[in-house]
Image (spheres, grey):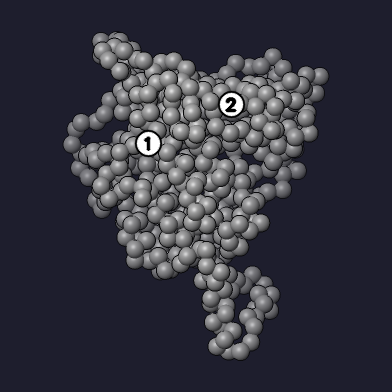
């Protein structure tokens, strides 16, 4: 179904019914409280139905407000609960087969796979006129983010990335505070996380391990370089490998960098510099396993002035349990960010400091005057599952591309694409830092200058190998 057509599947059903019986569709309220006409429901397909994919599907289904018509998962053990709930949904192990055989029965698709298959699944879906909800980070590499951002407009797809805090009350309140001028312009931002909570900085496994029964490994590998199955990859631990994941920065950056990116109206960074926590080899020399994301890192991005924030700023990201020091303006016994200070955001302004935790929770302002401003939890009005992030997307899908509900989405690809690119530029610096360019030579250990127009580092050409990737035959972006 082409989403640019004026006659959507729902309108077609309605008009056909009118022609057949000679009277208008009965209004929903006449049919009974809570009744949703079949023509008002989206047919949703699910790519990745275990873990976060399960909650994404259930939130989009919204207690029967929409239909789940197809479920694709390379490991049906992971998505068993979802498949048992939606027994009439068609089952697949390869999303390409699903799109080939069930496309006519699908309006929108949730994509909740490991990072390395986000882009190929999303682009193929949009090219068939489907609306897409894609888990964070939007893509595995920078070029993919640029491609998906453009594709959403080209194929008229209603899109949303799964950083659910973007739809929460906390980020909205922070935006109001900043726009009121309460902390003035910001020139320094700190963002941190306790991730990784999975193995990183480890050697590539070499032992042969028995495959999980029923796992479609070739489909799981998808566009990535083929390696043998190992439990250090699937399930969950794929996040710590560059072949499949994007490390701690990719996992939490879209949640934690979203508030400053949104509040300050940031665009693409112009410079990036990093330092990376090393591991110790058996001869006690600090080194890196280049295929594994590092155990910790500290990365600084430089952003130019924006319309909302008229001065440039430095944003410093730390992970692996590293966190910024306590600003003098914040009382020493106050937690910063999350309740245990394990994740958070600090925006340093001329007149004060603004802070929040994961998903924009616990927003606070500490003014130079000593006044502390926060919002009581009783004032929060958005009590929908995951802030209604999925529900807003499905309602926008029903209204169509370019409608007001689509324009109101908080993480459509026109926003999510540049946000994802920015944190992946951090990963580009991390991978450049870890890559030897000669015997014991690390030329990438310096400030890297980023040309966003051409998507390239201008002062370390070898680092540009990480802007994109090589794709296996049959899995490339087309």
What residue does disc 1 label? 468
In percent of width and height, residue 422 lies at 51, 32
> Which of the 4 image quarters holds residue 14?
bottom right
The reply to whether callout 2 and callout 1 are in contact (CB within 8 Å) is no
At horizontal 32% and vertical 52% (from top left) the residue drawn is: 74
Task: In the displayed orientation, state which residue is furthest to the left.
Answer: 208
> Which of the 4 image quarters holds residue 22?
bottom right
In percent of width and height, residue 478 lies at 36, 50
Foreground pick, 243 / 229: 243
CA gap between label 2 and label 1 equals 22 Å
Foreground pick, 203 / 81: 203
What residue does disc 2 label? 303
Task: In the displayed orientation, state which residue is furthest to the top.
Answer: 284
At horizontal 45% and vertical 56% (from top left) the residue drawn is: 126
Foreground pick, 380 / 333: 380
Tag 2's secondary structure? strand
At horizontal 34% and vertical 37% (from top left) the residue drawn is: 469
């Amino acid at each position: 179904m082409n989403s640019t057509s004026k006659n959507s599947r729902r309108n077609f059903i309605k008009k056909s019914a009118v022609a057949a019986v000679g009277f208008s569709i009965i209004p929903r309220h006449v049919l009974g409280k809570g009744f949703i006409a079949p023509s008002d429901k989206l047919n949703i397909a699910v790519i990745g139905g275990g873990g976060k994919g399960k909650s994404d599907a259930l939130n989009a289904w919204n207690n029967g407000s929409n239909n789940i018509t197809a479920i694709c998962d390379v490991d049906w053990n992971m998505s068993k609960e979802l498949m048992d709930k939606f027994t009439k949904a068609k089952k697949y192990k390869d999303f390409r087969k699903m799109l080939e055989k069930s496309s006519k029965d699908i309006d929108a698709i949730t994509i909740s796979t490991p990072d390395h298959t986000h882009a190929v699944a999303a682009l193929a879906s949009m090219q068939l006129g489907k609306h897409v909800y894609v888990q964070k980070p939007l893509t595995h590499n920078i070029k993919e983010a640029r491609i998906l951002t453009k594709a959403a407009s080209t194929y008229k797809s209603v899109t949303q990335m799964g950083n659910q805090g973007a739809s929460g009350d906390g980020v909205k309140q922070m935006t109001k505070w900043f726009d009121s001028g309460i902390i003035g312009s910001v020139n320094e931002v700190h963002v941190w996380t306790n991730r990784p909570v999975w193995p990183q900085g480890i050697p590539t496994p070499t032992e042969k391990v028995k495959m999980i029964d029923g796992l479609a490994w070739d489909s799981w590998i998808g566009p990535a370089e083929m390696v043998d199955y190992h439990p250090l990859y699937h399930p969950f631990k794929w996040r710590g490998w560059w072949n499949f994941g994007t490390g701690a920065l990719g996992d939490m950056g879209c949640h934690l960098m979203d508030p400053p990116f949104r509040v300050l109206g940031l665009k693409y960074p112009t410079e990036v510099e990093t330092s990376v926590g090393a591991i110790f080899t058996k001869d006690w020399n600090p080194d890196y396993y280049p295929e594994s994301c590092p155990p910790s890192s500290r990365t600084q991005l430089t952003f130019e002035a924006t319309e909302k924030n008229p001065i440039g700023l430095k944003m410093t990201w730390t992970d692996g349990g590293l966190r910024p020091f306590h600003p003098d303006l914040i009382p020493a016994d106050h937690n910063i960010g999350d309740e245990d200070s394990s994740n958070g955001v600090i925006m340093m302004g001329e007149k004060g400091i603004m802070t929040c935790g994961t998903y924009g929770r616990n927003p606070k302002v500490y003014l130079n005057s000593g006044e502390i401003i926060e919002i009581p939890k009783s004032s929060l009005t958005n009590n929908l599952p995951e802030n209604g992030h999925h529900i807003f997307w499905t309602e926008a899908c029903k209204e169509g591309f370019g409608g007001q509900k689509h324009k109101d989405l908080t993480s459509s690809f026109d926003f999510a694409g540049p946000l994802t690119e920015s944190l992946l530029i951090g990963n580009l610096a991390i991978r450049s830092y870890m890559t030897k360019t000669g015997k014991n030579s690390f030329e990438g250990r310096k400030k890297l200058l980023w040309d966003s127009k051409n998507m390239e580092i201008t002062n370390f050409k070898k680092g540009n190998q990480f802007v994109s990737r090589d794709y296996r035959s049959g899995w490339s972006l087309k």
